[in-house]
Image (spheres, rainbow, N blue to C red):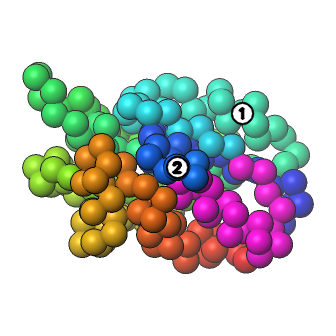
Amino acid sequence: MNRDLRICFVGDSFVAGEGDPRALGWSGRLTAHARSAGLALTAYNLGIRGQTSADIAARWRVECRSRLPAGIAGRLVFSFGVNDTVRTGDGIRVDVDTSVANLRAVLAAARDESWPVLMAGPPPVDDAAHNRRIADLDERFDKVCAEFGVPYIGSCHRLAADSVWMEQVRSGDGAHPGAEGYAVLAELLLPRWREWLDY
C-alpha cells in the first residue's frame, strides 16, 4: 500500500464525536488503533453537526479532493442518516427514498474518483419511534452499499441492545454518547476497519 495513506471521515455529529469529552469519537479511536499497529495514515474529520445526507452529498467531493490529491492512497469513510430521520412539523427532514438516492450519488462519485469507501450505518438514539426510522434507513443503506461492493457496518440494532451506549445517550443529550459509548461503537466497527485497511 502507498505509504502516503489519507482517509477522510465524512458525515454528521457522530463522525465529529459530539459528546465525547476526549474529542476522539469513533473515528479518532479507529485512527489511533491503526497508528498504534504501525499504519502511517493521515485522517481528516469532516463531520458537521446537524447535517443530512443531502448536505453531505452537496459538499463532500470538493472537501475530499483537496485532501486526497492524485498520487496518494486516498480513502473515504462515510456515516450519516440520523439527521435525515428526524421528525419535523412537516414530516421527516429527508424522506427515505431521497436519502437512498443521496447515498447512491455519493458512492457513484467516489467510484468515479477511484476512492475505496467504508460506510458506518446510523446509530440509535433515545427515542423508539425515531429508532424505527433509523433501522429502516439502515437496512436500505446496507442494500445500496452491497450493490456498490462497499463494506457496510450496521450499528443500529446492536447499539440499541448495548447498555453502555444507551445509558450514555440517555444521560447525555438524547442522541450522542460520551467517551465510553464511542469506545463501544469503535469496537463494533474495528473488525471491518482492520479488514478494509488490511492490517
Locate residue 72, reporting x and y percent: 84, 49
Locate residue 79, reporting x and y percent: 46, 49
Q: Give the range drawn in magenta.
A: 24-43
Residue type at the position of mark 2: Pro
- Taking the spot 61% from the left edge, 32% from the top edge, the residue there is 61
Q: Which residue lies under the disc numbered 2?
A: 21
> How far apart in space, not on screen, are marks 2 and 1 (Cα)?
30 Å
Q: Which of 194 and 163 is in front in this view?
A: 163
Q: What element carries label 1?
A: helix
Give the main secondary structure, helix, strand or loop, of the magenta stretch. Answer: helix
Q: In which quarter of the image is the N terminus?
A: bottom right
Locate residue 19, reporting x and y percent: 44, 46
Q: Which residue lies under the disc numbered 1?
A: 65
- Is residue 34 in the magenta section? yes
Closer to the N terminus: mark 2 or mark 1?
A: 2
- Taking the spot 24% from the left edge, 29% from the top edge, the residue there is 93
Crowding at dot 1, Cα within 10 Å, few <14 / some 14-19 / many 20+, comes out as few
Task: Give the vertical position of 134 relative to 152 (above or below).
Answer: above
Q: Is mark 2 on a helix, strand or loop?
A: loop
- Taking the spot 33% from the left edge, 64% from the top edge, the residue there is 165
- Is residue 156 in the magenta section? no
116 on left or right of 12: right
Q: In which quarter of the image is the C terminus?
A: bottom right
Task: Give the vertical position of 120 relative to 62 (above or below).
Answer: below
